[in-house]
């Protein structure tokens, strides 16, 4: 497997020999003649492995390893020495070195150690991706039954394998981050980092530190150097969510980085080179924001290489029922509770609702129904009142009393007695549904406990 290797040794002959061996195997090789220069190189470049001599003038290899491991945990270090001993080797390994080789260098030993180190690095990356996949195990898949969502997915899958930057727009709750993660999984960067930043959730005074990192002592409370999101996303994808909420000052800094692919940490003076693919998202109308002077035109066109618009749920009615069925499965796994079963009439009510909160609103409803009716059948009357009212006359007819003899009798009473009889009927059945638990009943029907106690007392008198 090819990779970029840094050789650190104060002997030019050793560096020359290692370069020849490694380049013959297809590796890219860089050199540093001291620990200080090695640390400077690592600040500005990304490498896959480091050969590090222990005995050097200035800071020695062990001290260089110690400092480097504070910031570059993912890079394997192979220590080399002409004065090797067991104590030094053990100390280096305890400090995080991958291996220890002695001079004179053996060709077979070098190549075997490099191969093992890079394989271990790749394995750790794969484990990290798997852990992230487990964490996202409850992620809702994109459902694309409707024509608008099929068109959206076709565009997403076309742009995913390219290196084009993408600007995703859409209302809150439509699944813009889900679209970005789906794009990542189908991109050339799928085995590289996906770093998400919610620009709206970070205070203005901290966003530069969050994105670019900061040096120790850069400001009060900066007790250690911090790696920013841009560095973490090197060679991968940086997802800038709610990009429209950035200040003009931060927009200017972002634009410079996007143009030059380099930046300085807050409080720093050294340029750091990065290679990132940017996906941005917003629920704002950036064209209007530009006219209002709230968003930079040059940044807008820099980000908008390939625009994608996630349609609201009300415009994709064909997706509502299959999405609800999928969410029931997701929530069942998430809460370790048996999912409820929605009746055909309940699904129809969901299909007729306008979903102002989009997919997020539907997800929250399914979660609530699972908690309240785990393993049970959910009739339409269990849905929120506003959904039933929205369904209009058709739904009002569905809430008829035709199927119950007791309710038919109520219809023959005058208004006052019918109201009293129905309240008794309603509370008795709901109390049974709540398992006799007044607190559960209060939550179920949205009535204060004190009122419920009072009403039940009147019923029992």
Image (cartoon, helix red, strand yellow):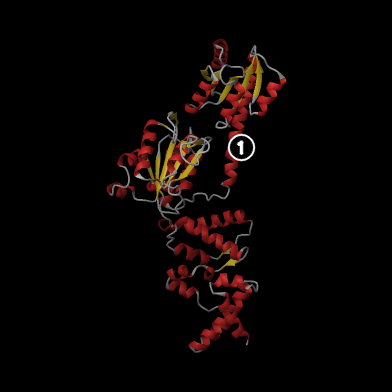
Residue farthest to the right, as pictured: 86
Tell me the quadrant of the picture where the N terminus can be found.
Answer: top right
Q: How many marks?
A: 1
Is residue 394 or residue 34 the one in the foreground? 34
* Residue 189 visible at all: no
Q: Is residue 303 left or right of residue 101?
A: left
Query: Tag 1: Cα neighbours inside 10 Å, few (<14), some, or many (≥20)?
Result: few
Q: Where is mark 1, residue-wise?
A: 127
Is residue 412 or residue 162 the one in the foreground? 162
Query: Residue 371: which quarter of the image?
Result: bottom right
Rendering coords of residue 390 (x, y %): 43, 68
* Residue 45 visible at all: yes
Query: Residue 277: which quarter of the image?
Result: top left
Rendering coords of residue 16 (x, y %): 54, 12
Residue farthest to the left, as pictured: 291
Residue in the picture at 57% in, 57% down: 328
Q: Is residue 378 left or right of residue 160?
A: right
Rendering coords of residue 246 (x, y %): 38, 46
Residue in the picture at 61% in, 17% down: 55
Does residue 310 lie above or below 58 as drawn? Answer: below
Residue in the picture at 63% in, 59% down: 338
* Circle 1: element type: helix
Rendering coords of residue 136 (x, y %): 56, 46
Does residue 169 lie above or below 370 as drawn? Answer: above
Q: Is residue 363 left or right of residue 438?
A: left
Tell me the quadrant of the picture where the C terminus can be found.
Answer: bottom right
Is residue 259 or residue 83 the one in the foreground? 83
Residue in the picture at 50% in, 77% down: 400
């Amino acid at each position: 497997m090819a990779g970029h290797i840094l050789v650190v040794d104060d002997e030019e002959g050793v560096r020359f020999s290692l370069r020849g061996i490694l380049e013959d195997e297809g590796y890219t090789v860089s050199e540093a003649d001291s620990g200080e220069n090695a640390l400077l190189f690592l600040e500005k470049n990304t490498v896959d492995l480091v050969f590090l001599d222990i005995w050097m003038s200035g800071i020695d290899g062990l001290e260089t390893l110690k400092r480097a491991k504070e910031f570059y945990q993912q890079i394997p270090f192979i220590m080399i020495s002409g004065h090797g001993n067991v104590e030094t080797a053990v100390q280096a390994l305890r400090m995080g070195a991958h291996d220890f080789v002695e001079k004179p260098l053996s060709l077979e030993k070098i190549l075997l150690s490099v191969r093992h180190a890079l394989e271990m690095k790749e394995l750790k990356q794969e484990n990290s991706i798997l852990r992230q996949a487990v964490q996202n195990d409850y992620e809702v898949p994109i459902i694309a039954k409707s024509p608008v969502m099929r068109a959206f997915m076709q565009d997403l899958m076309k742009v995913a394998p390219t290196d084009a930057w993408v600007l995703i727009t859409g209302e809150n709750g439509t699944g813009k981050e889900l679209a970005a993660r789906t794009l990542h999984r189908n991109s050339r960067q799928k085995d590289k980092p996906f770093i998400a930043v919610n620009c709206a959730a970070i205070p203005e005074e901290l966003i530069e530190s969050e994105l670019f990192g900061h040096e120790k002592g850069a400001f009060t409370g900066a007790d250690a150097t911090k790696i920013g999101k841009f560095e973490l996303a090197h060679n991968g994808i940086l997802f800038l969510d709610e990009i429209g909420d950035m200040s003009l000052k931060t927009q200017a800094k972002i634009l410079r980085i996007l143009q030059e692919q380099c930046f300085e940490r807050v409080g720093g003076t050294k340029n750091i080179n990065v290679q990132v693919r940017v996906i941005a998202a917003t629920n704002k109308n950036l064209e209007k924001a530009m006219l209002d002077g709230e968003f930079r035109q040059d940044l807008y066109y820099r980000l908008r290489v390939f625009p994608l618009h996630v349609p609201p749920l009300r415009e994709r009615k064909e997706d509502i029922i299959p999405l609800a069925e999928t969410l029931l499965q997701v929530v069942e796994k998430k809460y370790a509770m048996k999912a409820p079963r929605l009746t055909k009439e309940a699904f129809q009510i969901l299909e007729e609702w306008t979903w102002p909160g989009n997919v997020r609103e539907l997800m929250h409803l399914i979660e609530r129904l699972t908690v309240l009716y785990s393993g049970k059948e959910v009739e339409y009357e269990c849905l929120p009142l506003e959904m039933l009212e929205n369904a209009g006359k058709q739904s009002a007819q569905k809430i008829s009393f035709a199927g119950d003899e007791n309710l038919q009798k109520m219809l023959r009473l005058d208004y006052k007695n019918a109201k009293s009889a129905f309240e008794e009927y309603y509370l008795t059945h709901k109390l049974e549904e709540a398992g006799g638990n007044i607190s559960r009943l209060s939550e179920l029907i949205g009535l204060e406990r004190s009122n419920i106690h009072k009403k039940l007392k009147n019923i029992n008198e």
